[in-house]
Image (cartoon, grey):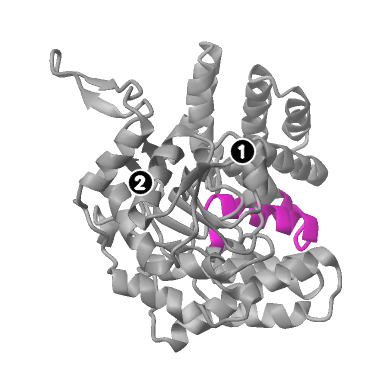
Amino acid sequence: MNELEEAERQLAANDVQGAYRALRAVAGYPATGLDDRALFARAATLLAELSRRFGAGPLAETIAKIAREPDDVRALYDAGYGLYEQSQFDLAATMLARANRLAPGQSAIVSELATALERLMRSGEAALLLDASGTPERDPFCAYLSGFHWIMSGELEVPRERVALLAGLDDERIVFMRRALEGMLARAGALIAAEITLDDRSLTAWHAVLSGSLLLHESPHGHDHPMRGRYAFVQDSPPLMREGIERLVTVIERPSRVIAAPDRASRILARATATRLGVPCIDWSAGVERGEGLVVVWSLEAIEDSTFLRAMHMHAPGQRLFAHASCWTEPLAYAPDVTTILYQSITHPWTGGAMEVDPATQQITRASPDPRSDDALAAEILATKSEDESVTSRDRVIAIARALASLPEAYRLGLHRASGQRWHQRLGGPVPSARFL
């Protein structure tokens, strides 16, 4: 196999990264060219050596067992689990798929493979895998995963059946999972009843269903294909932040104050938001973590303060969480109540790192942090106007929020909840978008 030979050549030349890229091209899921036992063992030999070079000694030893015995189901499962923990989801899925072929229908293998497929945004395959295995009928966790992946694929009937299977079980973890499915189904049902379309172009509606979060802006760039409203790479800008603020004020009640998250990008945005709302702005501290107000974050994924992130995981009475930008390919564990955009990679215009053209050399460089005060930069946001307005109208965003406002509190958008954990921010969904790897 040419790709495998290329990986071996790269490793022999001590090009570890090149060898890894070449190996992933052939051994990453679904690895259809590695069905042959000897080829699989050969690929495992390479991966074991690369894992050693990367410093993952215990994982390398596990994969070395597969190189010696490629039909060792336990080693395949352990390797898949270990690779998943290392965020090597495509290689993890390959190991687990082989384990499932050798020992089909084992709940631990099937559920771990489905979880790896989730990270690869292959929920349709995961749903079919789970149902074909027969595990949902005898394992509550697999029943949940089946329902979840069918919803992630845009199908609602099987998930209703899975909720019925989980009814009456009192294990705390299973109850939490069942309620998550019930919440997604309730939000989907409310939107359908309000005649709001749920199809493979309905990004804002599906984001509300899956993550309980209100999305304010769908990108006009490549909207029909390939992005469907998400961003791959975006350089954030004052006009885009201004649009987010203007749409935010149409869907929330005026808060008593704005609370700025603990980073500079958030402080700038919070000051602009507070000025637009005509309310005071304070900086977040542990003393105000459960207090009333609108918490403003530029991007939760950019926050490094773990105390703040833990505090925001739970709803509090009178408190709302607005994050201007949310990563859709590596999301935080929970979703903000409201977000302006979904991105894969983003730069901030003033905190350093934004791309700009050097006027002297005409070369692209990275900007240094802007030395102006936070208040001056906040004023610049409010002095600008939107340039690339959302494909979705404000009226549609408002209609989605209204359609979900009368649900039982446990199922509502985060915007209308006062207690409990924030919903998980889901990876992907029924609306496909291109992404760079």
Most frequent secondary structure within the magenta stretch: helix
Query: Residue 91 in the image: x percent, y percent?
Result: 60, 40
Residue where numbered disc 1 is placed: 87
Query: Residue 220 in the image: x percent, y percent?
Result: 24, 57
- The answer to whether any part of residue 37 appears in the image is no
Q: Residue furthest top?
A: 13
Query: Residue 236 in the image: x percent, y percent?
Result: 32, 41
Badge 1 density bin: few <14, some 14–19, many ≥20, Cα 10 Å: few
Q: Is residue 143 left or right of residue 18?
A: right
Q: Is residue 106 magenta?
A: yes
- The answer to whether any part of residue 33 appears in the image is yes
Q: Number of marks in the image?
A: 2
At a point 44% along the width and 64% down the height, the residue shown is 254
Quadrant of residue 370 within the rendered picture: top left
Q: Is residue 356 above or below residue 30?
A: above
Q: Is residue 201 above or below residue 271?
A: below
Q: Is residue 151 above or below residue 299?
A: below
Q: Is residue 365 left or right of residue 88?
A: left
In the image, the segment drawn in magenta is 99-123
Q: Amino acid at mark 2?
A: Ala
Residue where numbered disc 2 is placed: 272
